[in-house]
Image (tube, coloured by chain):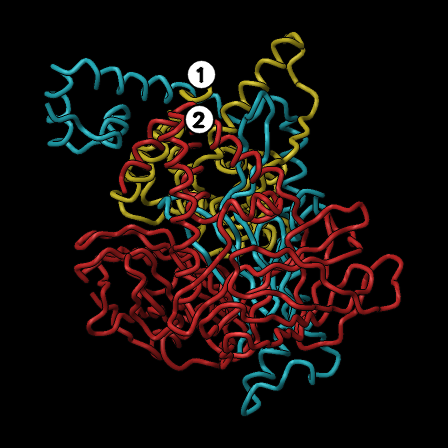
Chain colours: A cyan, B red, C yellow
């Protein structure tokens, strides 16, 4: 007896199959206990999910007032207002006010690169340090002339329980190349295919 | 299937809208061009391009690419690696990148999903042609033969990764054969623990500018010598090596190597480890042979030089470097064959805990983590 | 004379009403995708600012709500794609409900952590699709519109998400 694949059973549990497919699966389920159990398992898991409503531990009124005020400020100033960067996050790039500042210098460089017949060697541009690649916890940043671009970001880190301890495992491994490149290797979370992305200096 | 390049018109219309709104806009499908040449072993079986976006700010455009290409193997042979070259512009940094899929196993007629997920930048004045072009740089087959222009040396890098992949796959298969599922599970947990505990530093690679040290107590720059790890069967031996050290910065590595084999060597890569004040070692970078025309005769020596500076920090604080170690990580012979240290060699020199896992080990531990031991056993039995 | 309402005030009124009406819904949607309050707050603010900068879009109430929702979903997904971290310390504010015992509160936060860990296995889009379909009960066509992709793609995300999440629950049981 041929059984429907896992994806089909997962969709059946949520009523997400098209009419024809659903009828076919239902006919199979009528005579297959194993698949019925599978579908039941998926349904049980679906029922766990509504736990993910908004956390009850927040003071909603206070939060709402703060957000409304920030939105008002942001609209008035024509930029996105963010609270102080929290320790655990990378500096957001190209966001609101920071964008204007960061971009101004990238802009100079890029315009310079286009106006000249050929790009000036970077070291010759007055006041500009060399091009930099920087690893970060979430990927690779490039800094050129004071502006910063985020080029690559890796897959999400994950936690595993080993011997009773929770461990953080990086999902992306970054390999700097001393000739001026950086590579990020990870397993793509949607396709499951190992992927290695490399960025290079332009020459 | 080709995506027609409606070039400049699309770009113009798109740009004025973009400048007005200054907000993320989906890329029109005509702005991404995918080039697979006649006779290519791969054909496009489908694409999803509507998830990509661009943000135009002033005279620059940041292209947030998120493409999914379904590529079909029409070559009649097993494909084990594919590398794509993704280009928006080649004038300034951040304009192009390579995306490689090593550890593939795509049989004749099969398709695989190739995702491209990167940001590229482009000056908006550079308006000729499509916004983004995806080109095929190389395809590696099961027998290690190769197809493609190889502008990014993808043949060499994919071959090296394929060797690593086979090495690690065989390793886990052996464990399954000798110690069964329980043994495999233990090995997987060890792999995940190693991945979790691997010492990591943040590295900044600077090229083309004066190296500015940001160490808390900048020491005078001094020339430091590399210590070397040697593998008994390595075709190339490191002879001597130096770099300039100052606080948390290491600059201008130069390493001399000797060809101890009987064949001509055309590429050498040195793995570079650094040691901090507590004696802890970290993988820093890889140093490739600088000279593209390198042809090292048996017994001959050559120098590997790089004019870059590496800057080390951890959690935002500089990490001062006390010592450096090098080892030969890859060798390529003139006929294209490659050598790399075996797993036992790496284990013996305590390198396994410092190096990132191979793509195949990453993939297998991913299967184990997400789908369990039975799925992993099935996966190992496939080939 | 004093009966005339200045155009500026009218727009302000309309904007405030728009925000008040949709704030909670948008916040919850974003929170479900990104999984923590701090980021959800930032992204909610960003969403409204983006939306309110285009007055023309807001004229039709129904369309405006829909459009706002799409911006929120995509802003959250893009954020996740670009800013994934393994550990975010969620510092919960003091519980509003005093009728709950400390044990109950702990149990609930453990349960949430357990679910959150499972959801981390999903890609940003898989997570968004799962939240909209299985938590908000949105029909698949609507999810597809929110995420600007085809229904087939949505189905694929949902199937993968359910399979991964279920795999996680089973593995944790062992």
Residue A125 position in % (x across, y down) = 69, 83
**Chain ID, mark 1:** C
B55 left or right, relative to B114: right
Q: Nearer the viewer, mark 2 or mark 1?
A: 2
Residue A113 position in % (x across, y down) = 57, 83
Observer-nearest of B68 and C133 = B68
Residue at 38% x, 42% y is B170
* Residue linked to disc 1: C174
State yes or no: discs 2 and 1 in contact (Cβ < 8 Å): no
- Rendered view: B293 above or below A89: below
Q: Residues within 10 Å of mark 2 (few under 14, many from 20)?
A: some
Observer-nearest of B295 and A16 = B295
Observer-nearest of A147 and A59 = A147
- Label 2 to label 1: alpha-carbon separation: 17 Å
Q: Residues within 10 Å of mark 1 (few under 14, many from 20)?
A: few
**Chain ID, mark 2:** B
Does dot 2 land on a helix, a strand or a loop?
helix
Residue at 34% x, 27% y is B374
Residue at 32% x, 70% y is B33
Residue A143, quarter of picture? bottom right
A22 left or right, relative to A195: left
* Residue linked to disc 2: B183
Image quarter where the N terminus of chain B lies is bottom left
- Tell me, yes or no, whether dots 2 and 1 are on the same chain: no
Residue A179 position in % (x across, y down) = 59, 71
- Rendered view: B39 above or below B371: below
A35 left or right, relative to B354: left
Image quarter where the C terminus of chain B lies is top left
- Rendered view: A136 above or below A103: above
A7 left or right, relative to C25: left
Residue A145 position in % (x across, y down) = 68, 73
Residue C69 shows in this picture: no
């Amino acid at each position: 007896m041929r059984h429907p694949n896992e994806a089909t059973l997962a969709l059946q549990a949520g009523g997400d199959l098209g009419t024809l497919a659903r009828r076919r699966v239902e006919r199979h389920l009528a005579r297959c206990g194993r698949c019925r159990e599978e579908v039941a398992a998926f349904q049980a898991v679906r029922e766990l999910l509504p736990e993910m409503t908004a956390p009850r531990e927040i003071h909603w009124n206070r939060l709402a007032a703060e957000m409304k005020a920030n939105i008002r400020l942001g609209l008035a100033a024509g930029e996105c207002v963010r609270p102080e960067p929290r320790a655990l996050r990378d500096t957001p790039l190209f966001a609101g006010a920071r964008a204007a500042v960061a971009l101004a210098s990238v802009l100079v460089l890029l315009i310079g690169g286009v106006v000249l017949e050929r790009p000036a060697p970077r070291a010759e541009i007055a006041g500009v340090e060399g091009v930099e690649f920087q690893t970060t916890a979430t990927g690779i940043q490039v800094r050129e002339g004071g502006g910063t671009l985020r080029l690559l970001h890796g897959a999400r880190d994950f936690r595993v329980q080993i011997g009773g301890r929770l461990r953080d495992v990086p999902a992306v491994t970054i390999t700097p190349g001393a000739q001026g490149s950086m590579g990020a290797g990870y397993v793509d979370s949607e396709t499951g295919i190992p992927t290695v992305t490399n960025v290079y200096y332009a020459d | 299937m080709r995506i027609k390049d409606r070039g400049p018109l699309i770009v113009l219309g798109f740009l004025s809208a973009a400048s007005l709104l200054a907000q993320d806009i989906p890329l029109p499908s005509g702005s991404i061009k995918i080039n697979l040449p006649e006779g290519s072993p791969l054909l496009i079986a489908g694409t999803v391009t509507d998830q990509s976006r661009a943000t135009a700010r002033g005279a620059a455009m940041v292209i947030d690419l998120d493409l999914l290409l379904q590529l079909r193997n029409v070559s009649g042979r097993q494909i084990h690696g594919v590398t794509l070259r993704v280009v928006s512009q080649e004038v300034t940094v951040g304009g192009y990148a390579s995306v490689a899929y090593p550890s593939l196993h795509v049989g004749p007629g099969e398709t695989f999903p190739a995702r491209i997920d990167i940001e590229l930048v482009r000056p908006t004045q550079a308006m000729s042609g499509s916004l983004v072009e995806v080109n095929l740089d190389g395809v590696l087959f099961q027998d290690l033969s190769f197809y493609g222009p190889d502008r990014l040396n993808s043949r060499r890098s994919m071959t090296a990764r394929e060797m690593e992949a086979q090495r690690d796959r065989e390793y886990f298969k052996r464990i399954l054969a000798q110690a069964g599922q329980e043994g495999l599970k233990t090995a997987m947990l060890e792999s995940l623990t190693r991945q979790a505990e691997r010492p990591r530093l943040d590295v900044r690679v600077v090229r083309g500018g004066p190296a500015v040290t940001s160490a808390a107590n900048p020491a005078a720059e001094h020339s430091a010598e590399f210590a070397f790890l040697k593998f008994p069967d390595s075709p190339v031996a490191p002879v001597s090596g130096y770099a300039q050290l100052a606080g948390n910065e290491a600059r201008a590595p130069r390493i001399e190597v000797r060809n101890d084999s009987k064949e001509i060597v055309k590429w050498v890569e040195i793995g570079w480890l650094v040691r901090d004040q507590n004696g802890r070692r970290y993988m820093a970078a890889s140093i490739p042979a600088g000279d593209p025309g390198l042809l090292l005769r048996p017994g001959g020596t050559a120098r590997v030089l790089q004019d870059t500076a590496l800057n080390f920090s951890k959690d935002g604080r500089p990490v001062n470097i006390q010592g450096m170690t090098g080892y030969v990580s890859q060798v390529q012979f003139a006929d294209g064959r490659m050598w790399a240290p075996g797993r036992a060699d790496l284990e013996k020199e305590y390198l396994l805990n410092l190096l990132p896992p191979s793509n195949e080990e990453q993939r297998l531990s991913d299967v184990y983590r997400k789908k369990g031991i039975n799925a992993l056993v099935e996966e190992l039995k496939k080939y | 004379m004093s009966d005339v309402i200045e155009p500026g005030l009218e727009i302000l009124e309309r904007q405030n009403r728009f925000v008040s009406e949709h704030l909670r819904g948008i916040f919850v949607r974003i929170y479900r995708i990104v999984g923590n309050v701090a980021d959800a707050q930032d992204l909610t603010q960003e969403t409204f600012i983006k939306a309110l900068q285009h007055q023309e879009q807001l004229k039709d109430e129904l369309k405006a709500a829909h459009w706002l929702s799409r911006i929120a979903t995509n802003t959250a997904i893009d954020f996740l794609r670009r800013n994934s971290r393994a550990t975010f310390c969620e510092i919960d504010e003091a519980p509003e409900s005093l009728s709950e015992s400390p044990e109950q509160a702990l149990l609930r936060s453990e349960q949430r952590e357990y679910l959150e860990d499972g959801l981390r296995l999903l890609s940003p889009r898989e997570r968004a699709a799962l939240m909209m379909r299985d938590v908000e009960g949105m029909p698949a066509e609507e999810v597809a519109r929110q995420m600007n992709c085809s229904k087939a793609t949505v189905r694929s995300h949902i199937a993968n998400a359910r399979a991964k999440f279920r795999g996680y629950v089973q593995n944790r049981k062992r």
